[in-house]
Image (spheres, rainbow, N blue to C red):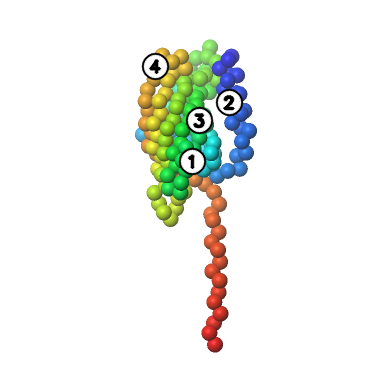
Amino acid sequence: MKRIFFALTLILLLNQQKLKAQASVGYYPWSSLLTISTNSKKVVWLDTRFQTNSLFSSLSVDLLPMINLKRGEVVQWYLGGGLRLNPLYRIADADADLITIDGYSVNVGVRISPLPKNRRFQVALELNPYVKDKFDSGVLKSHFGLVYIFGKRKKEAPVPETPANP
């Protein structure tokens, strides 16, 4: 019950931010993770990750609040941590909690925008120490993926017309 209360409190606190920001979506192919983020250009942002190649009973969701350490036009360094939930684990174990907490993680990463003409495409590299919920085991994960940031295109300023010479 304490775990459910902790998870719900965390979700409610994170939802207090206004999510009018530019969202992004990414995929880490070797980790089989689909990621959806709030505006990663803000100081604090939320990254949510979904496991894409597993059985329903082991489908995990990571909730990861992130803090930007350094942001530039090309490179963005960030740090965060969070928890991995398994909302469908009751399929495999009827006695499991309503929302099962699988474990906890710390994330240190960088997003790089390598294309000068389109900074919306990013390459993401991340180190991700992860421990199980009872702290009995853990693993150091690494992630490599591609991210696209959604948003409005910047309007180009109109070019002033020059008067014709008579």
Q: Residues within 10 Å of mark 3 (few under 14, many from 20)?
A: many
Please tell me which of labels 3 and 4 falls first in the chain.
3
Question: In the figure, is residue 110 to the left or right of 160?
Answer: left
Which residue is tagged 1? 25
Q: Is residue 75 above or below residue 99?
A: below
Please tell me which of labels 2 and 4 falls first in the chain.
2
| C-alpha gap between disc 3 and disc 4 | 20 Å
Q: Position of residue 28 (x, y in %)?
A: 40, 36
| C-alpha gap between disc 3 and disc 1 | 14 Å
Q: Position of residue 54 (x, y in %)?
A: 42, 27
Q: Amino acid at mark 1?
A: Val
Residue, far front = 70
Q: Amino acid at mark 3?
A: Leu
| C-alpha gap between disc 2 and disc 4 | 24 Å
Q: Residues within 10 Å of mark 2 (few under 14, many from 20)?
A: some
Q: Position of residue 126 (x, y in %)?
A: 40, 34
Please tell me which of labels 1 and 2 falls first in the chain.
2
Which residue is tagged 4? 137
Name the residue at 36% across, 34% down.
30
Residue, far bottom = 166
Which residue is tagged 2? 10
Q: Nearer the viewer, residue 34 or 128?
A: 128
| C-alpha gap between disc 4 and disc 1 | 30 Å
| C-alpha gap between disc 1 and disc 2 | 22 Å
Q: Amino acid at mark 4?
A: Ser
Which residue is tagged 3? 64
